[in-house]
Image (cartoon, rainbow, N blue to C red):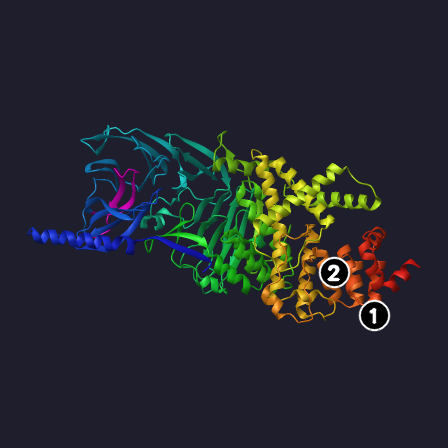
Amino acid sequence: MALRLIADFDLEKDVLPWLRVQQAASAAAGARGGGPGVLENNYECLRVLNVEQNRNIIYTYKDNKGNVFFGLYDYQTKQNEHLYTFEKDLQVVSCSVNREKTLLATSLVQAAKEGRSNELQPGSKCLTLLVEIHPINNVKVLKAVDSYIWVQFLYPHVESRPQRENHLLLLSEEKYIEQFHIQVVQEDGNRVVIKNSGHLPRERIAEDFVWAQWDMSEQRLYYIDLKKSRSVLKCIQFYADEHFNLMFEAPLDISLSDSGFKLVNFGYSHLQDQEELSEHLTLCVFTNHTGSLCVCYCPNFDSWEQITYSVFYFHKGHSKTFTTTLGSVDSRVTKGITFLNLDYYVAVYLPGHFFHLLNIQHPDLICHSLFLTENSEVIDMLPHSPLQSLSGSLVLDSCSGKLYRAFLNQSYLLEFLWNSRLDCERMALLHCVLSCGQDPRRLEAKIIQWISENISACHSFDLIQEFIIASSYWSIYPETSNMDKLLPYSSLLTWDTEIPGITLVTEEIPLPLMKVHSFKGYWEKLNSNLEYVKYSKPHLHYNNSMVRREWHNLISEEKTGKRRSTVYVRNILDNAIKVISNLEAKNLEPRLTPLFQEEDNHQQLLIGLMVSELRDHLLRHLQGVEKKKIEQMVLDYVSKLLDLICQILEASWRKHNLHPWALHFNRQASAAEFAVFHIMTRILEATNTLFLPLPPESVQLFVTPWTVIHQAPLSVEFPKQEYWSFHTLHVILGVRCLPLHNLLHYIDHGVLLLTEAAVTRLMKDLDNTEKNEKLKFSIIMRLPPVNLKYTLFSKPWHVPSLIFSCKKSICLLLG
């Protein structure tokens, strides 16, 4: 399936066997002592209650008397332990345990059974308890009220020493949030008790909220309150030094009622699904390490025919509202919409109806997000049970009691890419697969293979361009933050084609108002994103426009005999040499393609200029990053561009089993040569449009395999070492594959660029038939005067053979 779910925890496998062993041991002990033993437990009531910040999992079950048992599965040790037993038949609303596992907080309500007397305190519906469990000792009543209560211990990011003070959040159905401060002391060895349990300090940190979400990993509390009927999202960050800050306020253009009430990730109780505690809306906040802040929202379903959901990309300053039509009017939505946080993506799906993979790093173009309808087989392979996205990639299936790590399934998405038929799907899948970042060399090889099979299949974008830009971006993106703002992510700037099955409305939204002035970690990155949205108009993505102008100036000066200072040109060429050296150091395998020992000064200038301009661009905008690191990132980026071009050509060469003797003019061109020539022409078209450099010289010596030598005809003589630039090889293949009028048309329109090595090779290897004399003369007439003089006279050891091989053409040319 598109989502890969790896189970980290399963109640049935990780808890149930342990419980049965415990029950058998207790029964045996009771039999030996003549007692009744332990009554059989009702394991059908076994369910997960909470997942703590350290991924410890609290669960509960009942015996046949209704007594409530609390257990804990330690994520690190993979061991279970019994925490506490409440000897009354009650229903658990919420439960949490502190990091040291010395205190347990829980809230309980009367079990729904007819004829059952109230076992709680008179007049109360919900009982909230704080229990000493190391060892089991005192029980303190925190609340006994006629409203539901949820509890959650804070987990400071300090694990090296026991905490003398614990902090407990308490959320009330009456729409307030309190924090209790609980001091503990050790007595009689390891016994931990609450200090001054009669009076626990507390403070109210929020009021009048209608929705709240807990981020266990980052220890953040998100909540929404209504101010003059306007929804405002707020976030509180809790710290290890016992204080907390209100980090931001952000207005939300959504419709919420002050009579509703919804909690997310505050334990997993059946009460949260009851009508009196929910408006049936789905709303959640997702963040990731890049400083993104997304709010995903789906209101009540107005009809069974279509569903509307919105994503507020606060880190980008806009929202997108999507509307999708469900397959048939008779279909019924039996489960709610699901939002899952998948790092660079958010998955939105409705089982049996649609799957939407939203790109949250680059949400501007809808084609960078994948949308699939019920007609796709992917829909049938999605989980049908409701999943709850926890912090990071953790996902809980509360129905089955399984905790998963959720990932995008790179292998499946790659297979789906091969079978996709729509350009929008191909674009989205290409980026999605590259973002997974697993074994990039192998992944690139598979994508190149797909490109070679579908080179002319896409009409909305150039496959080679998109692959080169996207793969180069992902190769350097993890190096530092803000690269998504500075490097191009896609070859496209706009996308006007509709995506089948979905409509979209994009709106600007007010940015969050940051309430603090000093930022670290995630908050520093979020603030940087918000500052970029405020002040960076137009966008700062690098492009080669400056390189294009400077390169043309240098070439023009060369033709007119004018030159910049030698030092300037030498620095540019030194940049190119560094790129080639960097590329050689990272690619040790020999290449089959006979590229590119020949020097191509024009391409070297282009590479060197790109290095210079990109380095200056990053130095201007990457504050606080060492110059040496930036220089290496630039070398890696430009090297990657060149390496991808080499990989595409190398893959084509191997696919068509093209042998070295194919480049001899005494043999007829094969279908393989036509295919490789076509690929090279498409590469040239892609790089020219974006003004990207081509490899000017080899990063590996050409090695003729021994098996190839044995397969060659006896008449073939292998040159010891003969290697060409991209343009030279392209011209040689063009001469072999194209009729004369097509060849000259390609030359006249700049598709084939005549190089000294190509012209010299033609003059030497073509015989003196009338057809070849016409070809030679036509090519010589198209050489610029400077190149013509250089080709014929600058290298004396070539002159006799050239005159001999093309005497008619030269005589005609020189009069």
Q: Quadrant of the C terminus?
A: bottom right
Q: Principal SS element in the magenta part?
A: strand
Q: Secondary structure at mark 1?
A: loop
Residue 533 versus residue 323 in the image, above or below: above
**Mark number for residue 755?**
none
Q: Position of residue 226 (x, y in %)?
A: 45, 38
Q: Is residue 90 magenta?
A: yes
Q: Is residue 551 left or right of residue 386?
A: right
- Residue farthest left in this picture: 34
- Residue farthest right in this picture: 815
Q: Is residue 11 left or right of residue 706?
A: left
Residue drawn at (82%, 41%) of the image: 562
**Does residue 363 show up?**
no
**Mark number for residue 769?**
1
Q: Residues within 10 Å of mark 1 (few under 14, many from 20)?
A: few
Q: Secondary structure at mark 2?
A: helix
Q: Is residue 791 left or right of residue 431?
A: right
Residue drawn at (37%, 36%) of the image: 157
Depth check, front residue: 17 or 632: 632
Depth check, front residue: 230 or 698: 698
Rounded to the nearest angstrom, the CA distance separating label 2 from label 1 is: 20 Å
In the image, what residue type sits under mark 2?
Answer: Val
Q: Which residue is mark 2?
A: 731
Q: Is residue 91 magenta?
A: yes
In the image, what residue type sits under mark 1?
Answer: Thr
Q: Quadrant of residue 243?
A: top left
Q: Position of residue 169 (x, y in %)?
A: 34, 36
Q: Quadrant of the N terminus?
A: bottom left
Chain-order first, disc 2 or disc 1: 2
Q: Position of residue 768 (x, y in %)?
A: 83, 68
Magenta-highlighted residues: 89-114
